[in-house]
Amino acid sequence: MCMVIFAPQDEECSRRFHLLFAIFAFATCGGYSGGLRLSVDCVNKTESNLSIDVAFAYPFRLHQVTFEVPTCEGKERQKVALIGDSSSSAEFFVTVAVFAFLYSLAATVVYIFFQNKYRENNRGPLIDFIVTVVFSFLWLVGSSAWAKGLSDVKVATDPKEVLLLMSACKQPSNKCMAVHSPVMSSLNTSVVFGFLNFILWAGNIWFVFKETGWHSSSQRYLSDPVERHSSSYNQGGYNQDTYGSSSGYNQQASLGPSSDEFGQQSGGPASFTNQI
């Protein structure tokens, strides 16, 4: 079961979270459409317009969003366009999310059905490790760029800023106001999911690295000096034991001749008695 979100130890479980978070990221950004409503109340009420709708959506090419407002100078109308273009950061963010989703989907299929081929020749884990590092970097860059782009979108679609673009609102005799402002909650959520994706992918780098041959080779490299030290210690203990046993044997051997010599010395008085 997938119990850990930010440090998944199972690759299949990890890719499931990648899929889910990537869907939330590009759905909340790429599927956005919003707008604001303004009202212009002229001195001459017949020239007023109390419901001016301004709609915008992904990819947020705001300079292409135009709408007409009264000038409060007869029947003339002014064509106004919003300011700004955040399409590059928004499209880059959504592109990263879509490709991350597709790769995670493909990786999940490989983990489930082609596990043997994935580990063959260490090529699968190595490719997975490189792609994970690349996507971690892309998520960081894309989320940061989109956070800045979203900030620009909020400023450009602020009703107070839009009212400043209208010539009728520059006259004190006319009353201009915002009926309602755009709702940006889903776009804020997309930025949050973008950085969560970065944390998820970056946290998964270590677990993917452990599947590569680089990790196993480094483990062998670190274990070799320890094995050499332990083997040399064992050899030193063996020599001490051998030396101890051999020295004991030599002591026993040296005791043998002493007893014989003692026997020879005691045999001397016995022969002298026999001669008498």
Image: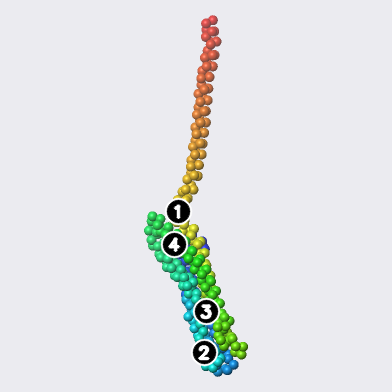
Which corner quadrant of the image does residue 49 belong to?
A: bottom right
Q: Residues within 10 Å of mark 3 (few under 14, many from 20)?
A: some
Q: Give the vertical position of 261 relative to 68 (above or below).
A: above
**Labelled disc at residue 131:** 4
Tag 1–tag 4 contact (CB < 8 Å): no
Residue 256 percent across, percent down from the top left: 51, 21
Q: Residues within 10 Å of mark 4 (few under 14, many from 20)?
A: some
Q: Earlier in the sequence, mark 1 or mark 4?
A: 4
- What amino acid type should be assigned to the residue bearing mark 3? Ile
* Image point (46%, 68%), residue name: 96
Q: Earlier in the sequence, mark 2 or mark 1?
A: 2
Q: Give the vertical position of 33 relative to 266 (above or below).
A: below
Residue 247 percent across, percent down from the top left: 52, 28
Q: Earlier in the sequence, mark 2 or mark 3?
A: 2
In the rendered view, does 98 fall on the left or right side of 182?
left
Tag 2 residue: 77
Residue 4 percent across, percent down from the top left: 51, 63
Nearer to me, 211 or 153: 153
